[in-house]
């Protein structure tokens, strides 16, 4: 919908138009200006699953489509930015979203490994599952640019390019053959973009420092964050550090113009021998978020087992060299 000329046609005639396209991209990078036509998205509503009531707007998922050439430009910038972040160790260690060799499974393994180790030592663990509302859509552009400059270390023409990339974006909605007029998008990272997820991760970078100063373990996947604290037996009724951390977490979100989702926040308690009753720990104000955990279900690693089974045929040559990996 964003491209008068189909992307396939671009590829077929690349030998003829390659140099002009390259000139446009290089001009954008050297001037620090993103063409206005690259910053318009067309959104097409799509039912989340067949059979849902088509008259209920909440049943639709907005699918955002950007111009093909804008994604070519974004990909080039993404590769250079990612290389810079990796070389300088800037990305958050405990953020598994949008990172090479990381996934929901790697986040799950780390969190539950810590929980199991604490429980094996006779401790209880309080786990808080935190959620943000429409986090990608509420990113403030000025705050993001400030963090790119002061936290990431980007400046000059590169910073000017990112400001141009974020500002003056527009969006329209298309249903069948009808399309709305364009509306401005003063907040958020572009949906359906290549740079958007990475920029959101950089927007959250200061959050790690907020959590670490309380000595609280945490792990994030995109905008989902888990914070957890092992409680010694003699200190089993004290969660003041966790409450203080949660308070600072909410305050930081407010300063960053991000919305804390109270309704989706959950608290779980783990303990020795699978004990998971809230009475095991005095949760205080966290009691309202408590959700009972069926330990046997939570700790069945079905996803991991299935992934391992699928990967075994490809890894078998390695197993032959290194010996049986399951021993």
Image: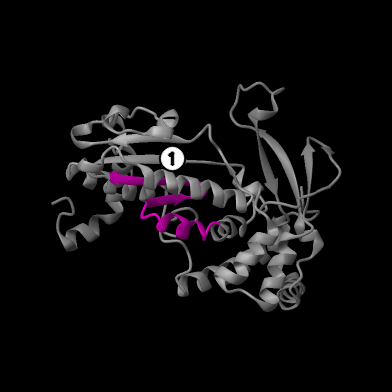
Q: Give yes or no for residue 258 being in the magenta stretch.
A: no
Q: Quadrant of residue 116?
A: top left
Up-down relation of residue 258 to residue 159 (above or below) = above
Residue topped by disc 1: 129
Residue 10 point in image, percent of width and height: 72, 61
Q: Residue at x 28, y 50 (%)?
A: 313
Q: Which residues are magenta?
A: 204-230
Q: Give yes or no for residue 220 being in the magenta stretch.
A: yes
242 relative position to 119: left or right: right
Q: Quadrant of residue 240?
A: top left
26 relative position to 286: left or right: right
Q: Residue at x 51, y 41 (%)?
A: 131
Q: Residue furthest right?
A: 181
Residue 196 point in image, percent of width and height: 62, 56
Between residues 184 and 308, which one lies in front from this camera angle? Answer: 184
Residue 174 point in image, percent of width and height: 78, 39
127 relative position to 157: left or right: left
Q: Residue at x 68, y 55 (%)?
A: 140
Q: Residue at x 72, y 78 (%)?
A: 30
Up-down relation of residue 236 to residue 56 (above or below) = below
Count how many numbered circles sit on residues in the image.
Answer: 1
Between residues 34 and 22, which one lies in front from this camera angle? Answer: 34
């Amino acid at each position: 919908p964003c491209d008068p000329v189909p992307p396939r046609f671009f590829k077929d005639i690349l030998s003829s138009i390659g140099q002009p396209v390259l000139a446009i991209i290089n001009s954008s990078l050297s001037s620090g200006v993103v063409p206005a036509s690259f910053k318009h998205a067309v959104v097409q509503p799509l039912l989340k699953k067949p059979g849902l009531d088509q008259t209920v707007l909440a049943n639709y998922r907005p699918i955002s489509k950007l111009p093909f050439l804008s994604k070519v430009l974004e990909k080039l910038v993404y590769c250079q930015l990612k290389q810079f972040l990796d070389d300088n160790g800037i990305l958050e260690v405990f953020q598994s979203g949008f990172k090479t060799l990381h996934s929901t499974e790697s986040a799950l393994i780390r969190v539950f490994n810590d929980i199991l180790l604490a429980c094996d030592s006779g401790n209880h663990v309080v786990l808080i599952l935190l959620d943000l509302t429409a986090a990608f859509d509420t990113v403030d552009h000025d705050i993001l640019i400030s963090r790119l400059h002061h936290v990431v270390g980007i400046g000059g023409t590169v910073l000017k390019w990112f400001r141009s990339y974020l500002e003056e974006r527009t969006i329209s909605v298309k249903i069948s053959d009808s399309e709305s007029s364009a509306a401005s998008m003063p907040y958020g990272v572009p949906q359906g973009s290549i740079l958007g997820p990475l920029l959101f991760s950089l927007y959250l970078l200061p959050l790690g420092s907020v959590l670490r100063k309380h000595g609280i373990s945490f792990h994030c996947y995109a905008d989902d964050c888990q914070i957890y604290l092992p409680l010694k037996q003699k200190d089993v009724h004290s969660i003041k550090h966790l409450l203080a951390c949660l308070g600072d977490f909410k305050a930081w979100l407010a300063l960053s113009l991000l919305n804390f989702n109270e309704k989706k926040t959950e608290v779980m308690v783990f303990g020795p021998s699978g004990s998971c009753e809230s009475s095991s720990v005095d949760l205080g104000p966290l009691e309202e978020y408590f959700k009972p955990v069926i330990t046997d279900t939570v700790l069945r690693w079905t996803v991991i087992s299935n992934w391992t089974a699928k990967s075994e045929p490809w890894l078998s040559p390695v197993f032959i060299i290194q010996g049986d990996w399951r021993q």
